[in-house]
Image (cartoon, rainbow, N blue to C red):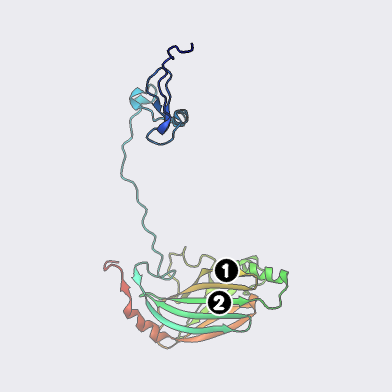
Amino acid sequence: MAAGGDRDSVPSRSTHQGVVPGGDGRAGLDWTGKDGLGDPGRRCRRSAGRSQPMDPRTLTVTFFQDFPIPASGPRPSAPRFEPPPWAAPPSYELPAVVHVGKFLHHSPAMVMALRSAEVFSTGCSLNLSWIIRRGEEDEDDWADKHALFFQPGMRLRRGTVPFSGLMFGVQFADGSKASTGARGPHGFMGSTEEPEPPTLVLNNGGGSGAPDELAGSGTLWLWPLPPAGDLRLVAQWIDFGMEESSITLDGGQLRQAAAGVQRFWPEK
C-alpha cells in the first residue's frame, strides 16, 4: 500500500456469535447452528456416521416377490399357570393375618421364630425367620456353615448326611402329619394328582451373610386348613446344632380366621 494512497477496502469481519469472517466482503457464516454444536465439520461427521433408513420404494424385488405374504393370524396365548391348592396359596386372595410371635428355637448361637400366619381359604402360610451367630468356629468351619446355610439341600442330595438340613413338619389334632422332607426340591409344583392331606411346602425367602452372623427367612405353605384343636409345628436343623423342637398352635383359631379372607374379584 503506497503511503498516503487509498487503502484496499477490506470489510470489517466480526467473530461475534460465531460469525466466520468472509474475505470477499460478504457476511460471514454463522457456525453455531441451532444445535449449538458449533463446528460444521463436526456436525457433518456426526451425520455421516448415522445410518439412514432405506426407502422401500427404491428397492428392486426379484426373487422374493413370487412368494405369498403370510397372513398374520391371532397370537396364541398360553393359559395362565395356577398352582394347585396343595402347592401354593391362591393368587387372588387377600389373607387374614394372625399374629403368632413364638420361638421355635432359642439358644446363644441360634434363634428361630414363627412370626405370623397368613390364612387363605385353602390353607395357611406360616412366616418364619432365623438368625445364627458365630461362636468359636475358625475360618474354615465358618466358611462351611456359610455353604450349608445358602445351599441347605446339598448334603442331603449327595446322600452323605441325611436329615441334617433344615426340616419342618406339622401334626394335626387328628394325628395326620406332613413334612417338608417328604418331597423333592420342587415340592408339589409338578404334581397334578392330589396328594393325601396334609401337605407342607417350604419356600425360602432369602438370607444374608456377615463375618459373624447369618440370617434368613422363609414361609411354610400348609394345606388344607387345620381342624380345630392343637396344631403342632416341628423344626430341626442338625447342621447348625438345632435338635428337634416344636411349638403348639391353635388350629381352630387359624380355621376361624379364614372367614376374614377377601377375594380380589368375585369370579376368581
Are circles 2 and 1 on residues that touch, CB within 8 Å?
A: no
To which quarter of the image does residue 263 belong? bottom left
Residue nearest the viewer, comparing 132 with 84: 132
Q: Estimate the x, y position of residue 114 in percent, counting from the top left.
A: 49, 80
- Which residue appears at 46% of the width and 64% of the height? 189
Q: Estimate the x, y position of residue 265 in percent, counting from the top left.
A: 28, 67
CA gap, disc 2 to disc 1? Answer: 11 Å
To which quarter of the image does residue 123 belong? bottom left
Q: Is residue 37 visible?
A: yes
- Which residue appears at 37% of the width and 58% of the height? 80
Residue nearest the viewer, comparing 54 with 245: 54
Q: Estimate the x, y position of residue 145 in percent, counting from the top left.
A: 66, 71
The mark found on residue 208 in the picture is 1
From the image, tell me which residue sits under label 2: 130
Q: Is residue 142 left or right of residue 75?
A: right
Q: Is residue 152 visible?
A: no
- Quarter of the image containing the C terminus? bottom left
Q: Secondary structure at mark 1?
A: strand
Residue nearest the viewer, comparing 234 with 12: 12
State the count of labels: 2
For label 2, the crowd category at 10 Å Cα-Cα, with few meaning under 14, some 14 to 19 and many 20 or more, is some
For this orientation, the residue located farthest to the bottom is 229
Q: Estimate the x, y position of residue 261 in percent, counting from the top left.
A: 33, 76
Q: Amino acid at mark 2?
A: Trp
- Which residue appears at 48% of the width and 12% of the height? 3
For label 1, the crowd category at 10 Å Cα-Cα, with few meaning under 14, some 14 to 19 and many 20 or more, is few
Tell which circle, 2 or 1, labels the residue nearer the N-terminal end.
Answer: 2
Q: Is residue 160 above or below residue 232?
A: above
Q: Amino acid at mark 1?
A: Ser
The mark found on residue 239 in the picture is none
